[in-house]
Amino acid sequence: MSSEPRVALARLVGALEAHLDAVERRRSDTDPVVKDAYSSLADAFEGYDEALYEAHDEVTPFVLFDEDAEDDDADDDADELDEDDDDLDDEDDDEQDDDADGPDDRHPRL
């Protein structure tokens, strides 16, 4: 990757144009040309961001979307939801047990 920001910027602009062309000519949702253009765009962006930082100690305000990390996050979220559901089930069981013991002494019947 080039440490020259202008060269990296030109590569990024070219990758953006190639990605747009690929998307406009997409033949299916899994078109390998689009996937390749996506990867090239991500690489060009990383190259530009690194070159900008090396030359000027500056970064862009953008973050690349990491599909693998997103899938892991979705799995983690699903696990957390399952744990929350289990906690709620336990609370429901406790309430049912309390009701089966008789009236609640804290709230006398009138």
Image (tube, grey):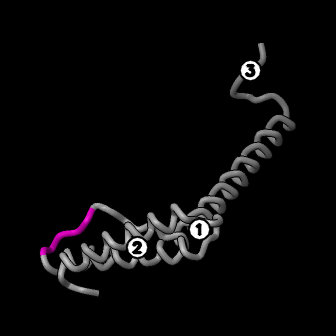
Query: What amino acid type should be assigned to the residue bearing mark 1?
Result: Asp
Q: Can residue 53 be seen?
A: no
The residue tagged 1 is 71
Quadrant of res 77: bottom right
Q: Secondary structure at mark 1?
A: helix
Sequence-wise first label, 3 or 2: 2
> Are dots 3 and 2 in contact, CB under 8 Å?
no
Write the start and end of the magenta stretch as one range.
56-60
Query: What amino acid type should be assigned to the residue bearing mark 2?
Result: Leu
The quarter of the image holding the C terminus is top right
- Where residue 63 sits: x, y (%)? 37, 65
The residue tagged 3 is 108
- Confirm whether the magenta stretch covers residue 15: no
Residue at (65% x, 65% y) in the render: 28
The residue tagged 2 is 41
Say which of marks 3 and 1 sits in front.
1
